[in-house]
Amino acid sequence: MESSRTFSRRRRPLIVGNWKMNGLIESAVDMGEALRQGFDERNTSCEVVVCPPFTALHALHQQLGESSVKLGAQNVFCEEFGPYTGEICGIMLRNVGCRYVILGHSERRTLFGENHSLIVRKTMSSFRDGLQPIVCIGESLEQREKGETLVVLQEQLLPVLKALADQRERWVQLVVAYEPVWAIGTGKVASTDQIQEVHYYLRGLLKEHFDEDASQRVRILYGGSVKPDNAAAIFALPDVDGGLIGSASLQSKEFLAIIDALPAVD
Ligand code: PGA
C-alpha cells in the first residue's frame, strides 16, 4: 500500500528488529550481510537497528562495519561492573558496538519480573552509558477489555518521564515502543484506530510532562505482529514513527519489506 503521508523531519523514522532468543553466530552474520546490502542499496533516510542475542553482538558488529544499520541489545543491567552474576552492563554493550537498548519488553516484565522502578533505573543507566533506550509499554488483553489501557500505559511510562524531567538533552533521545501484549507474537495486530488513539495519548503525556517541542521530537514506535502486509497502514498513522518488529525481523526479505513500507521523509 502506497502511503501519502510524509514523516516530519523532527522525527526520523525508526525500525528496530528484536530477534529475541533466536540465532547462532553464523545465521546472525548471514542476516547482517543481507540487511547491510539491502539497506545500504535503498538509501532511505530512516534509521534501522537490529537487536540480536548478546552472543551475536560482537560478530554482527564486525560484520556491519561502516554500514548504517545500527546495533542494539535486548536488555542491560543498571550497575557499572561488579558482582552481578549473569548480567551485562551498558559499557560492555557500547564496547561491542551497541547504540540502542530495548527496555521493559513485556516478556521481561512478565517472565523475569521486571518492575517499573527497575525499568527506570535501566533507562537512566543506559543514558549514562551512552545508549539510547527504547522503553516498551503495553496493556494485556484483560486490561484492554476492562477499558484500562490508557491508565496502564500511563502507569508504565510516567515513572520514566518523571525521572527524566530535568534532563532535556536526554528526554529528546528517548524512544517509546507501544506494544499491546495481546498482539506480540500472536498474529493479532491492533487496529489502526486503536494504535493511533494510544500514540496520540502518549504524545499528549509527553507534552504534559516535558513540553510541546519534546512531544514532537520523541519517537513512538508500534510493535506487535507488524508484517509486510500491515506495516504501511500502521506507519501512515500520524503519531507512529516506526516499528519494533519481532518475528518478521528474522527474515531479511520480510524485514526489508517492512522498511519499504515507511512513508517518505519530507
Ligand atoms: P512480534 O514481536 O512482531 O513477533 O509480534 C514484537 C516484539 O515482541 O517486540
Image (spheres, grey):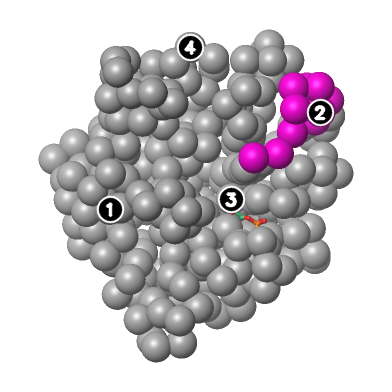
Please indicate, yes or no, whether residue 79 appears anywhere in the rendered image: yes
Q: CA distance from mark 2 to mark 3?
A: 21 Å
Secondary structure of residue under mark 4: helix
Mark 1 and mark 2: Cα distance apart in space: 34 Å
Comes first in the chain, label 4 or label 2? 2
Kindly report the distance in space between the C-alpha atoms of the residues bearing marks 4 and 3: 24 Å
Q: Spatial distance from mark 1 to mark 4, Cα to Cα?
A: 27 Å
> Element at badge 2?
helix
- The relative height of residue 31 versus residue 58 in the rendered view (above or below) is below
The majority secondary structure of the magenta stretch comes to helix
Q: Nearer the viewer, mark 3 or mark 1?
A: 1
Amino acid type of the residue that numbered disc 1 sits on in the rendered structure: His
Q: Position of residue 2 (x, y in %)?
A: 78, 63
Q: Secondary structure at mark 3?
A: strand
Q: Which residue is mark 3?
A: 244
Which residues lie in the magenta part? 21-32
**What's the residue at 71%, 39% (across, down)?**
22
Dot 2, how many residues are within 10 Å of its Cα: few (below 14), some (14-19), or many (20+)? few
Camera-nearest label, 4 or 2: 2
Mark 4 surroundings within 10 Å by alpha-carbon count, few (fewer than 14), some (14 through 19), many (20 or more): few
Amino acid type at circle 4 is: Asn
Q: Nearer the viewer, mark 1 or mark 4?
A: 1
How far is disc 3 from disc 1 in space, using C-alphas? Answer: 20 Å
Side of 187 where 101 appears, left or right:
left
Quadrant of the snapshot with the N terminus: bottom right
The residue where tag 2 is placed is 27
User: Which residue type does callout 2 highlight?
Assistant: Ser
